[in-house]
Image (cartoon, rainbow, N blue to C red):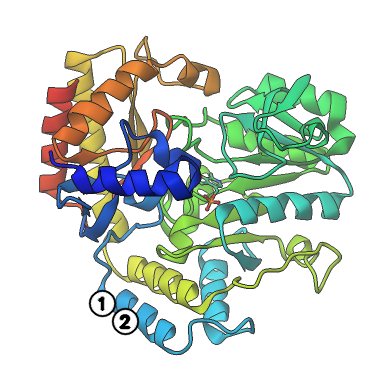
């Protein structure tokens, strides 16, 4: 596979950007990232003209694929041509807010921001401002973006920043517990219950190999937070409008969080984040309340148009049936291949999320420790070597999930299963 142009671009990029990229994970492809020229339906074409089936889909935002339906495209073009933004309110942000409030029962009010990181950062500030408490409980192996309060590792007894530049003082307010471990959460509440502003969790861990909640785990979190006057924040940046359709993952699990953070799909492929929830809590945001929150680009008209038209298209067409159907076929095909060729591995996912995790015992991971035990080196050889050479692009590390879009086809699924067979 010729990659001269990518290599040349990477050399240029290295001399002007740290690691040659604008987001840490993008440099993970070995020996260097390929540069994308353009998307085409469920595929991408790199800077050297090589075509791949794309299961990354922008890391999740592109529910409809690279080839947007005409109403979505027209609305984006129309907004961009009217002067792209104003720093003042526009009708389309009200339209998208009304749409989300109508479809996600826990969301009575919403504020739009520009990234998932901004959403989780603002949600944590809001929870602290509303409760007057400082501590937050997160899950080991969860990811809530590049923000100070959650770039923290360790356990509830012993935390440390997971990135240089994060003050220890932030880590002291963050209590990481294993996902699916009710006992650990109980202990944390026994010790710190009066100081805990919120438990923030992804309904399904999507940045750690896809880890599903055990039955009743989210009900348990709902109950224990309520008992202690703490908030439950669902980080639905990945699962929002992907799992559970327009009601999001919370509708699938039948749990009503106090706050939900959104990102990715809700912006239809443009930079976005949002914090939704109970009106009484969201009203604590300035200017109606004392918790400061603001942004030049927030509610950007092009983003709002892309998000609204994407969700409207999903509401009016067979988007979820198509995506979930292909997801089911991928997962069941992969399960057969894994059972036959590599029974020590696990196939995980739901709806439009899927992943083969290189576990060592064929057991579905329950928490970050299980995923950490996976065979990362073998995964690297298989996927950056064999899969890419067969024209399939998967997520860039062992821990991120892969996404099905409306543009993907039966043929894409068949070709991908054949490639996995070969690679495994
Ligand atoms: N929360 C979750 C669950 C995510 O997966 C991500 C990003 O992948 C974020 C937050 C951060 O979003 P962003 O990258 O848009 O800042």
Tag 2 secondary structure: helix
Image side of residue 393 versus residue 168, left or right: left
Which residue lies under the disc numbered 1?
Answer: 70
- Answer yes or no: do the residues labelled 1 and 2 have beta carbons within 8 Å? yes
Q: Looking at this view, is 301 or 28 the one in front?
A: 28
Give the residue displayed 59% in from the left and 72% down from the top. 297
Between 249 and 126, the one lying in front of the other is: 126
The answer to whether 148 appears left or right of 11 in the picture is right
Kindly tell me whether residue 115 is visible in this rendering: yes
Q: Residue at x 50, y 65 (%)?
A: 103
Judge whether 246 appears above or below 84 on screen.
above
Dot 2: within a 10 Å radius of its alpha carbon, few (fewer than 14), some, or many (20 or more) residues? some
Which residue matches tag 2? 74
Tag of residue 126: none
The image shows residue 213 at horizontal and vertical percentages of 52, 31
Residue nearer the viewer, 180 or 360: 360
- Label 1 packing within 10 angstroms: few (<14), some (14-19), many (20+): few
Residue at the location (65% across, 67% down)?
A: 111
Q: Secondary structure at mark 1?
A: helix
> What residue is shown at x 64% (from left), y 84% (from top)?
88
Q: Position of residue 149 (x, y in %)?
A: 72, 41
Q: Indicate if the residue with disc 2 has its beta carbon within 8 Å of ligand 1.
A: no
């Amino acid at each position: 596979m010729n990659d001269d142009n990518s290599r040349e671009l990477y050399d240029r990029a290295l001399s002007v950007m740290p690691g040659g990229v604008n987001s840490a994970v993008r440099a993970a492809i070995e020996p260097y990232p390929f540069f994308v020229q353009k998307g085409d339906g469920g595929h991408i074409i790199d800077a050297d003209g090589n075509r791949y089936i794309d299961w990354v889909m922008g890391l999740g935002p592109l529910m409809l694929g690279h080839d947007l339906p005409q109403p979505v495209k027209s609305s984006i073009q129309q907004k961009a041509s009217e002067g792209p933004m104003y720093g003042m309110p526009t009708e389309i942000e009200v339209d998208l807010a009304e749409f989300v409030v109508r479809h996600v029962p826990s969301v009575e009010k919403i504020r739009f921001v520009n990234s998932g990181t901004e959403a989780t950062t603002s949600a944590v500030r809001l929870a602290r401002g509303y409760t007057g408490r400082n501590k937050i409980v997160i899950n080991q192996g969860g990811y809530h973006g590049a923000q100070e309060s959650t770039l923290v590792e360790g356990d509830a007894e012993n935390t440390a920043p997971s990135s240089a530049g994060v003050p220890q003082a932030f880590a002291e307010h963050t209590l990481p517990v294993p996902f699916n471990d009710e006992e650990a959460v109980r202990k944390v509440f026994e010790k710190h219950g009066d100081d805990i502003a919120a438990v923030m969790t992804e309904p399904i861990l999507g940045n750690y190999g896809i880890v599903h909640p055990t039955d009743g785990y989210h009900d348990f979190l709902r109950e224990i937070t309520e008992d202690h006057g703490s908030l439950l924040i669902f980080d639905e940046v990945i699962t929002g409008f992907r799992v559970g359709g327009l009601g999001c993952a919370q509708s699938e699990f039948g749990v009503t969080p106090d706050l939900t953070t959104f990102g990715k799909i809700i912006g239809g492929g443009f930079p976005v984040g949002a914090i939704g929830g109970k009106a009484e809590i969201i009203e604590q945001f300035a200017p109606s309340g004392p918790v400061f929150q603001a942004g030049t680009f927030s509610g950007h008209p092009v983003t709002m148009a892309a998000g609204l038209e994407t969700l409207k298209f999903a509401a009016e067409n067979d988007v979820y049936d198509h995506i979930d159907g292909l997801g089911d076929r991928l997962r069941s095909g992969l399960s057969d291949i894994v059972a036959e060729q590599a029974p020590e591995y696990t196939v995980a996912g739901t709806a439009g999320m899927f992943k083969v995790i290189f576990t060592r015992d064929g057991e579905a991971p329950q928490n970050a420790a299980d995923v950490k035990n996976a065979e990362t080196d073998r995964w690297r050889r298989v996927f950056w070597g064999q899969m890419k050479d067969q024209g399939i692009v998967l997520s860039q590390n062992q821990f991120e999930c892969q996404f099905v879009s409306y543009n993907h086809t039966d043929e894409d699924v068949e070709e991908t299963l054949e490639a996995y067979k070969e690679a495994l």
